[in-house]
Amino acid sequence: MRKTAIVTGASRGIGRAIALRLAADGFGVVVNYAGNKAKAEEVVNEITSAGGRALAIQADVANPEDVKQLFEKTLKAFGQIDVVVNNAGIMQLSPIAKGDVETFDKVIATNLRGTFMVFSQAAQHVAEGGRIIAFSSSVLARRLPSYGPYIASKAGVEGLVPVLANELRGHKITVNAVAPGPIATPLFFEGKSEELIKQTASITPLERLGEPDDIAGVVSFLAGPDGGWINGQILRPNGGLV
Ligand SMILES: NC(=O)c1ccc[n+]([C@@H]2O[C@H](COP(=O)([O-])OP(=O)(O)OC[C@H]3O[C@@H](n4cnc5c(N)ncnc54)[C@H](OP(=O)(O)O)[C@@H]3O)[C@@H](O)[C@H]2O)c1
């Protein structure tokens, strides 16, 4: 049977690059999105016009019923799920002193509760030999002011990864997270001045921002045969950011 991957948040940014890469690797790909149907359909068209298999499915990862349906619809369309990449995420900044619980709850609901729900469905449905991949961020180590809700959400993701890896003992399924450094996507650029973008690009020894394809290559490795002995790990593709 040909293999299938679900990529959440695949309508743009890093998720789009992952969907295209996994399709090129031979996976049938579910291109999940939250609201941007047209962009998700563009990704599907790009895959199918290159001879691949893809389907766009709307689901808000912060909504447990949506996540359940995402997995049900994937199984109905493709018959099996081999790889799940929970890339969907949001970044909203707010200093802790402001006490902005709305922002905190929204970021936690999408990034952490979303990962918990996707992990739960993945644990129930991924086939033996499969791969589950979550998304954290290298910004955790930088302790930047205003990043409290985002860093808290990603720290929670890094906590869930080795626990699920242990819970899946005996199923030959690996669970890992990818924690990128700054990557040139809408999430990174939003609200940043030209100067801050330049400054951020220069802080790694490689002196450039990462590109979505830099991360898609890491996911392809984890999802493919060479990644089979990596389990319970957080990979930090970040150009040497400290
Ligand atoms: N860019 C960076 O510098 C960077 C660095 C470290 C980690 N990351 C992580 O990498 C991942 C991807 O980031 P990105 O930069 O590619 O972001 P992006 O360009 O803003 O794209 C976000 C994607 O997630 C989807 N999404 C947002 N909320 C969702 C929800 N509730 N349910 C389902 N899908 C949802 C969006 O769908 P719609 O288009 O439909 O809204 C979109 O496809 C995130 O987890 C982020 O935290 C990014």
Image (cartoon, helix red, strand yellow):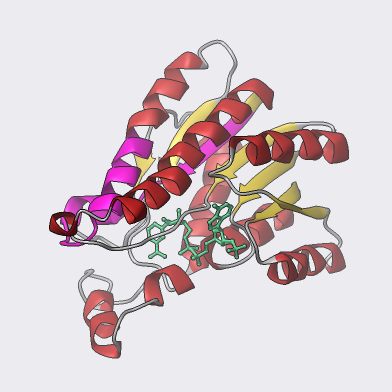
Q: Is residue 228 visible?
A: no
Q: Using the rendered view, name the quadrant where residue 33 is placed.
A: bottom right
Q: Is residue 241 left or right of residue 64?
A: left
- In the rendering, at what x and y percent does residue 28 appear? 78, 47
As displayed, is residue 47 above or below residue 133?
below
Q: Quadrant of the N terminus?
A: top right
The residue sitting at 71% across, 41% down in the picture is 70
Is 111 magenta? The answer is: no
The residue sitting at 73% across, 55% down in the picture is 23
Q: Using the rendered view, name the quadrant where residue 120 is placed.
A: top right
**Which span is picked out in magenta?**
130-158
Q: Quadrant of the C terminus?
A: bottom left
Residue most toward the left? 97
Q: Is residue 184 left or right of residue 54?
A: left
As displayed, is residue 166 above or below residue 185?
above
Q: Is residue 217 left or right of residue 154?
A: right
